[in-house]
Amino acid sequence: MRILEMKKTLGIIVGLLFISLAQVNAQTTPSNTKKSLDKVVAVIGGSIILQSEIDMQYAQYLSQGNPDNADVRCQILQGLISQKILGQQAIIDSIAVTEDDVDNEIDRRLRSSIARAGGQERLEQFLNRSLIQYKDEIRPDIKEMLIANKMQGKITENVAVTPLEVKRYFDAIPKDSLPFFNTEVEIGEVVVYPKMNKLEKEAFRDKTEALRLRVKGGEDFATLARLYSQDPGSAREGGDLGFMDRTGLVKEFAATAFKLKSGELSQVIETEFGFHVLQLVERRGEQVNVRHILIKTEPVQASMDRAKAHIDSVYNKVVKKTVDFGTAASLYSDNNDTKYNGGMMLNAENVQSRTTFIPTDKLDPAIFLTVDTMKAGTVSQPVLFTAADGKQGYRFLLLKSKTGPHQANLEQDFPKIKEVAFEDKTNRTVSEWFEKRRKITYIKIDSEFQTCSEIATWTTAQN
């Protein structure tokens, strides 16, 4: 593997880093565990890499159902070497991460692991240790990973590509290697969800208040959450959301959660999701572990009728050109994911590039059926639809553009080619940075890994 691929390898390590030490212990006997933990497989400047570090990440690789593959161990070591060198430079450049950053990353990963395992108790059984113990064990590795990521970000922060560089990159691609693009469309939307008045919401508030009073009367909060909460992500956990900071919570929810004392029950509050009652489990600085019961508000017919009348009015303004589509979306649309982008949808499989060009085979079937017969520049009639989160509302669509199947060319595909050219320049920048560090860093690799093609580049250094 060339040094050019270090960036991708480091990404693999980031994915594998959150691992279970229990898995390693289960795969080693007491007699060889000590040997594995004590063995140094690489010395990178003033840092070492232990066999146990590789074993732990390899155990995670196997736990995901992957086949035994010696090359993966080489890739893991390659990524760890990259991470150590980035970390050492970060110290020189005074790059650090806060303890809150580390806490947030650990909690984010734990929430994902808890969801995959089917609950905190099952995850702890799988790990053979408490989550508190496990968090302490993985903390140094998570911190090192975050610092390495931040250092790599500094290396590439000033990378940019000019139109001339994009053209040169495109011209260097062999003509028979140019990609072929299927039909792509640009689609905008204006969405209106029904909004209920205070009287229409009263029944849902009363239901939530009744549950709050039952908890206050001595019934178990977690049991009631499992039975009645309409939050599918936390109901089976007794309403427990795990530790979260303010950025992970909607404004009204966070404002209440951070005022509660341990064990205290909140009044009923309203958010965009419905009505909640909260109970604080624990607070650690600027993070809270809170459980809640959610009762969603279901729109009544009168609110649906108002929404329909509202979107018809907006649609007529767009059709009569008294307001352009982008302005209508920013002023009237209830979909925050698109309204601040002039109503335009982003390619969900390539959100990072923020491209609005979406292959038709990646469209929601209902959207495809609507725009398939439309002409570019036209809008569809408002229709009732159900969003991914189950909410019902009305929307109309704009087909901004439609590009037929074609082989890549600069005129039609400049944004895509620019993205690839940028990634190539970023990789080369990282590669060149590592090449310089390789020549001035003491690197010693154990003979067991000397045959790895991924490691060969490192062992040709001056030492």
Image (tube, rainbow, N blue to C red):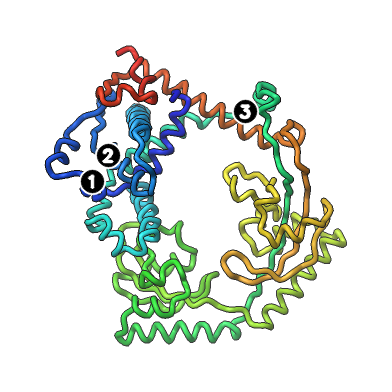
Q: Which residue is mark 1?
A: 27
Position above or below: 212 against 115: below
Q: Which residue is mark 3?
A: 161
| Residue at the (62%, 28%) spot, across then down | 161
Mark whose residue sits in front, 2 or 1: 1
Q: Is residue 108 left or right of residue 121?
A: right
Q: Are marks 2 and 3 in contact (CB under 8 Å)?
A: no
| Residue at the (67%, 54%) spot, across then down | 363
State which tag comes first along the sequence, 1 or 3. Answer: 1
The quarter of the displayed image where residue 87 is located: top left
Q: Quadrant of the C terminus?
A: top left
Type of residue at label 1? Answer: Gln
| Residue at the (78%, 47%) spot, across then down | 402
Position above or below: 31 against 453: below
Disc 2: CA contacts within 10 A as few (<14), some (14-19) or many (>=20):
many
Q: Is residue 368 left or right of residue 387?
A: right
